[in-house]
Image (cartoon, rainbow, N blue to C red):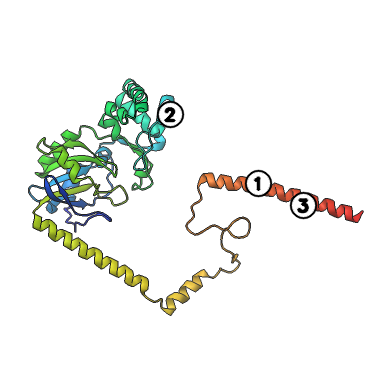
Amino acid sequence: MEEIVQDLKPNKGKSLVIDTDFGSFARYPVKTHVVKSGDSLDDILLTYVGDNRREGDIIFMSEKIVAISQGRAFPIDTIKPRRMARILSKFVYKSPYGIGLGIPETMELAIRELGIVRILFAAFCSAVTKPFGIRGVFYRICGEKARAIDGPCDCTIPPYNHYAKLAPDKPDKVAAHLSEVTGNGIVVIDANDLGVEVLGRSSDAIDIAFCKQVFKDNPLDQGDQQTPLAIVRKLTAEEAERIRKAESAQKAEESEQQDGEASRPECPKEAEAKAEEALPCDGEDASPAGEGDGEPIEKGTCISGADSRSNQDEDVNTDDDAHETEEEETGESDEKSE
């Protein structure tokens, strides 16, 4: 693969620079192609990180691309959970930042990976300690392999928004190998807005506390940014201040552009085009969707499956009422005719 040099910028809503107990660091997100099973991590790093890296930089990798490249991600409909997986998944805390073991399919992966005995023991200990306000016992017993298992999420890049995945296999060994390939330190990390877990390091000299502090604001994010890599670089105080000023200036410029676009008067041609788009086509009902029978649907309203079923039930009830009313009216007219 040909080496790609990127214009490294922070992800939206994130900052390049962070201050830690170990100094100030820049975190440069690196965009890649959508990684698939069997892809070479060697090629990915050399292609996308390439000349962007310097001596002394540390490359942080999302544990997800390591697991995917190892073939440890599976389409959700190919996982057939056993009855015990269905039962246990009901008692898992549902986090807004990830499914974890909260669905039968991911619990099934945990049972396959760790064994039913360990999972049941962890579940028992969790049930016993929870009334005393002690949380997290299940994952402390099951370890990082269980914590890193995750399920499908709407915000994930397709096709992995319909996949469940295991933790990467032997992440320390993977990190050590990739460090030899690149000449840089490597960290395999599992980060989200709840916390940071370090799954693999190329060397014990890379401090775990440093890794957690430098990634505590989740600079790679979890959406469609497609940036599973980050180049982490130590900065001097002057370099950190210069980058912060440049970011502030960029944000101010973007804000002015948005304000300018919002206040720009609409030209007559644009207004005419919008008016033509609003007109109904020949033979098309001019009334907006949702008007007529029932309440009008507000713009931006999302109707869920449950809501749809509820609406269908209401429609059935409404039809019954209408039928009864029709019968009453018919009865009244019969009385009058008599």
Q: Which mark is residue 91?
A: none
Q: Position of residue 1 (x, y in %)?
A: 18, 50
For numbered disc 2, what is the local secondary structure?
A: helix
Furthest toward the front, the residue is 132
The first of marks 1 and 3 along the sequence is: 1
Q: Is residue 134 visible?
A: yes
Quote the CA–CA distance across marks 1 and 3. 15 Å
The first of marks 2 and 3 along the sequence is: 2
Q: What residue does disc 3 label?
A: 326
**Residue at image x 60%, y 47%?**
312
Q: Is residue 79 visible?
A: no
Residues at discs 1 and 3 in contact (Cβ within 8 Å)? no
**Residue at image x 25%, y 35%?**
168
Q: Along the horizontal axis of the image, is 313 left or right of 59?
A: right
For numbered disc 3, what is the local secondary structure?
A: helix
Residue 239 or 202: which is nearer the viewer?
A: 239
Residues at discs 2 and 1 in contact (Cβ within 8 Å)? no
Please determine whether, in this image, residue 243 is positioned above or below residue 260.
above
Residue type at numbered disc 3: Glu
Residue type at numbered disc 2: Arg
Q: Tag 2: Cα neighbours inside 10 Å, few (<14), some, or many (≥20)?
A: some
**Residue at image x 20%, y 61%?**
247
Quote the CA–CA distance across marks 2 and 3. 49 Å
Furthest toward the right, the residue is 338
Q: Position of residue 197 (x, y in %)?
A: 23, 38
Please determine whether, in this image, residue 163 is positioned above or below residue 11.
above
Q: Position of residue 268 (x, y in %)?
A: 44, 79
Q: What residue does disc 2 label?
A: 86
**Residue at image x 43%, y 29%?**
86
Q: Position of residue 326 (x, y in %)?
A: 77, 52
Q: What residue does disc 1 label?
A: 316
The first of marks 2 and 1 along the sequence is: 2
